[in-house]
Each structure stands twice: as structure tokens, then as C-alpha cells.
Amino acid sequence: MRLSLVIPVAHTNTLNELIASFPSELGFEAIFALEPGCDEEKAIIEKACAEDGRLKLIINPERLGPMGSRISGIKAATGDVIAFADADDVLEKGYFKALEREFDAGVDAVCFSFSYLKGEKKRRTLLRVARRKVVSGVAAGKLLLRDLTVRGFLWAKAFRREVLLNMPCIDLRCRFEDSPFALPALCCCAKVSLIPDSLYIYRKGNGGMTSTLSSTRPYERIASFAAIRHYEDAYCPELKPHSLFASARNYLSLLLDISLARKDGLGKKAARELKRDYRLTCCNGMLPLEGRTYSSYLVGALPYMPIALIK
């Protein structure tokens, strides 16, 4: 197995910890997709690349966000397997060997467990499979929508390169962009391995993109839900009942986002419009791209298309 790890990089103060956790195997490469204006991070990566020929640096010509950076990294990757990491986080020991074991068994993707750091305390997520099992890609997609044993985080997954190059993809430039990318990728797989092994350490509450207080956060949340609905309508309608099953939990997530956004200046009228538009995403049929509170995030991103066609 040759593994390419794609890492979007903006401002972070823990990048050296991620680099120090890289596996030693020769079949590993890391591709950093760096946003403009990150001079300190650029210096760290250039030094690491000079010391380790397995590491590569791509500098984005403009600010692309996490998903645009990942797409650039996927296009540059040379591995037959592609995985993802965030620049704030750390790989567990045994990361490479565990993935090699699974892909050598003939699967198209691996979903693995993770731990998280809150302060200096490391804790294992409780939402994981009890034992290894192999399921179809659509079955894995259904589990992702229910957000229990399969989470939406891209850094908790690895895929064969050809899956990512041929899947219907969306460059959603907002928070919560992982699931609208991960769901189509899983559904394009014949076999997905779900393993209980913790292979990744997520730094919780690190001030990253998804944890930043912002009045736009609920709009981005609904844009993510709506992007998934567009995928279901166009490619995989059998997933819709599973989205509806999760709608109550998703609504609670939206209410939390609205509460945070109210602290950042969101008005009562805007909050009511957000709740209305969320209910509309649960209706049958294709969602309109215009005239909704979240439209600006989707108009430039849709339709889904192969990665090679995304500029």
C-alpha cells in the first residue's frame, strides 16, 4: 500500500506535533495544502519537507477553505490510498499498519475510531463499532447519516484513490463540509471496513473552523444538510429515510448553532427563517438553489461532479 495523507493547513500552533506523529514507512506521503498568508506554518512545512522527502507542500493560489484544499491535495496525491488529517491533530501509533491490513484485505474504504484531546486529557470516543465488520458502501452511508458508529469526519476515513477520483464531489466552502463529501465517497465503494481501532487523535475545542463562534454558523449547518439532500435526490434516493430518521437530532444541532449565533448578533427574524428553511430541507423533491437563507453556499458549489472537473 502507498498512502497519501492530505492535510489542509491554515493558522495553527500545533503543526509540529502532527508531523512528529507521521509513520516511518516508506509507502507514506503527506501533502500539505497551505492557505495564503500562513508564513509561520509555511516555514515549518518547508523545513519538514527538506528533512523528509515523503512530504510535499502545495500553496493555494487563493483561500480555498478545508474542502478546496483537500481537493487540491487529492489531485496531487500519488498513493493508491488517500486519507485525511487536520493540521491541529495527531496520528496514533499503528496508523499506517492498521490501514495497510484493511486495504490488503480488498476493501475500498476504512472507517476507524478515534480519540480526542480536551486540554491535556486524552479520551476515546464511545461512538464506535464493537468489532470489525465489512459492509457495503450504501450501508456505511446509512450509518453515517445516523451519525453513530460511522461519523462524518473525513479524518476518520481512508479511501482507495480511484473511489475519490470517480465519486460525485462537491466543494462546499463552509463549516460542516465533511459529510457532504464523505457520504458520496462511501456510497461509491463496494466494500467498507468498519474497525474499532483508534487511529487518530482529534484536538477538541482548538478554536478551529467548526468551533468558532459566528453568526454564519447555522446557515453553514443547513447548507451542509441541504447538500446531502441534493446528493440523495440525484444519486441515492434510498438514503432519504435515514436522513429523515436523523432530522430531529440535526434540528437540535441547528438550535445550538442558532443559540451561539444569537450571541454573535443574529436577530430573531433571521432565527425564524433558519428554522423554516431547515424544515423545508426535510421535504421531498429537489431543493431550490436560490431563495433560501443558505443559498449562497450552494449556488457556486453544486452540482456534484468528479473531482477532475472541479477547478
Image (spheres, helix red, strand yellow):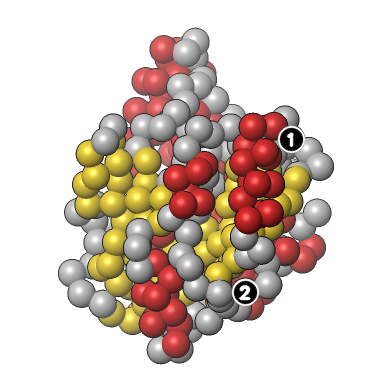
- Helix, strand or loop status at disc 2: loop
Q: Which residue is drawn at 47% across and 38% down?
A: 14
In the displayed image of the protein, which residue is found farthest to the bottom?
105
> Which residue appears at 35% of the width and 68% of the height?
94
For disc 1, the neighbor class at 10 Å (few under 14, some 14 to 19, many from 20) is: some
Residue 143 image offset from top left, x and y in percent: 34, 64
Residue 98 horizontal/vertical position (percent): 36, 74
The residue carrying mark 1 is 36
Which amino acid type is marked by label 2?
Answer: Gly
Please name the amino acid that badge 1 sits on: Pro
Q: In this view, does 153 lie above or below 174?
A: below
Contact (Cβ within 8 Å) of mark 2 with mark 1: no
Q: Name the residue under label 2.
A: 79
- Residue 80 in percent (x, y) is at 60, 78
Residue 263 picture location, percent across and down: 41, 12
Q: Is residue 154 visible?
A: no
The answer to whether residue 118 of the structure is visible from this angle is: yes
Crowding near pointer 2: few (<14 within 10 Å), some, many (20+)?
A: some
Q: Is mark 1 on a helix, strand or loop?
A: loop
Q: Quadrant of the C terminus?
A: bottom right
Q: Residue at 22% x, 47% y: name it.
A: 123
